[in-house]
Each structure stands twice: as C-alpha cells, then as structure tokens.
Image: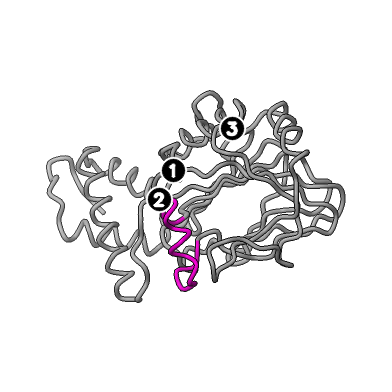
Amino acid sequence: MNMTATKQAITQELRAWIIAQARAGCRPDDVLQSMRSSGWDEETAMTALETTLEEYLKDHAKANQLPPPVPVPAPDLAGAPSMVRALDRDVRVLLTMTSPRLVVFGGLLSDEECEEMIALSSPRLARSETVHNASGGSEVHDSRTSDGMFFERGEHPICARIEKRIAALVNWPLENGEGLQVLRYRPGAEYKAHHDYFDPAQPGTPTILQRGGQRVGTVVMYLNTVPKGGGTSFPDVGVEVAPIRGNAVFFSYDRAHTTTRTLHAGTPVVEGEKWVATKWLREREFR
C-alpha cells in the first residue's frame, strides 16, 4: 500500500487491501499502524478499518452460514505493549494471538490475592458441575472432575476489586460479568475439551441466555503454580498455557461457533493441586 496524507478518501482499493491483510492473519493493530506509517490520519484509518472489517465479517458469516459476529471484550494492545495498566495494577503481556483471540497476562493477581481467594473459597467447595443442555440447568459430568464454587458478583471486597480490574483490562462493562468461580483440581483431575459459549442448538440454551445473553469472553486466573500438568490447552491451535500463580489467560469468541477456535481443556494435574478463578463475560448485563 502506498498512501499519502493528501489522499484520505476511503476507497475500494483501501478496503480490498484491509481485507487482504485480515485474510493473511494480520492483527488489526498492526494494520492500523501500517496505515499511520503510510500517511493516513488516525480518525480516517480507524473508520476505514472498523467499517471494512465489520462488513467483511458479516459477509463471510452469511456466505458460510455462520452466526453473525457480535462485539467482544478486548484489551487495548495498540502498539504491542509489554505492560498494560489494569485499573490499579500493571500487568505483563506474555503472549497474544489473533485466532483464537487470546492473551496471556502475567501478574494479574498478587500472591496475597491468590491466597485470599483460596482461603475464602475452600470451605464452600463441592463437586463441579457442567451445563445441562436439555434444561439449561447444571449437572455433575465425568468430563469435569474438579471441585468448585461460585461467588456472587462483588460478594467480598477482593471479588469486587478483581472484577473491576478485569473490566478495565478487557474494556467490558462490570455488570456484564458473571460472579467469580473458583476451582480446585486434585492429582488426575481435569476438564476435557469444551467451549465456554452456550450451544444454540441445545433446547436449554434460550433459558440460559435470558440472564445476560451469550458468553463472549473468559478469563482464567491461576491461584497457584502447579508442579506438573494442569495447563490450559487449546487443541485447535496447539497452544498450552502453564498454570503459574498470578497469571491469567483471556480469550474471546464473537459467535457461538467452532470457527472461533476457542476449544480448550484443563489438562490432568500430574503432581500437586491446581487452583483457578474463572470470570465469564456476557453480551449484556448478567442478572
């Protein structure tokens, strides 16, 4: 692309170039930076990028009979920073991916916060359940062999602090978040590969969606460092995130479909225990 600051019209040539970059797997932030370097002003470049990608994604979904994409949470990673501010805390950016939309953060929680979350949740742990697709309720299932519990949103000061930090980090309304869930995995425990969105084909999904729409993002926070095993794997892309205390993996999914490549699993714990806190983000206010 060879553009100058004197040519600011959003042409079909420019739109075709943006789409070509998207098909090649370029990150939107990198495309925007390339446009700036070529002389495009910030406002025109942003408008061209946003409108072109929105139209492209809708056309792609329609052509392939996919659900239309929806807005999703997204941390501000313009300029590829190594550190971002999450309200009250500086957080390291350890890994970013475009497909799936995935970011690994270092130091999202302090050691003290991890210990407090474990202490508050321990007395309330029970066998973890999964969504019962037929009814929209929940059930114990062999695919998930952890113990867990849910906090109400803002139930304790530490819950409120972490929830506000996440909302600021991923630019998503606080009220759109579910309460924090804490899980403990003993040796051998795992959560087999699954998606976090609710399957539209299941009869119980409409009932679930009444509380705030689809899930569109997940933050998994590691409350301890596991000696062996217990990673979060993404089998579609061959990535596994190690469970290290205070770190977190964020991923979003703009439609309830496998094309988001967000299939993931909690791999079996080989040695020690794994403690995690999970935050799910909905389309709308979660009630």
Q: Quadrant of the N terminus?
A: bottom left
Viewed as shown, does residue 112 lie left or right of 98?
right
Q: Which residues are magenta?
A: 198-214
Q: Which mark is residue 176?
A: 1
Q: Which mark is residue 283?
A: 2
Is 44 in front, or is 160?
A: 160
Viewed as shown, does residue 240 lie left or right of 45?
right
Name the magenta segment's main secondary structure: loop
Q: Secondary structure at mark 1?
A: helix
Give amino acid for label 1: Asn
Whether 104 is among the magenta residues is: no
Give amino acid for label 2: Glu
Picture quadrant of residue 124 = top right
Q: Position of residue 15 (x, y in %)?
A: 22, 58
The answer for how far apart the CA atoms under marks 2 and 3 are is 22 Å
Q: Secondary structure at mark 2?
A: loop
Label 1 CA crowd tier, 10 Å (few <14, some 14–19, many 20+): many
Viewed as shown, does residue 179 lie left or right of 215?
right
The answer for how far apart the CA atoms under marks 1 and 3 are is 16 Å
What residue is disc 3 on? 155
The answer for how far apart the CA atoms under marks 1 and 2 are is 7 Å
The residue positioned 19% from the left and 43% from the top of the image is 44
Q: Secondary structure at mark 3?
A: loop
**Which label's residue is closer to the chain start, 1 or 2?**
1
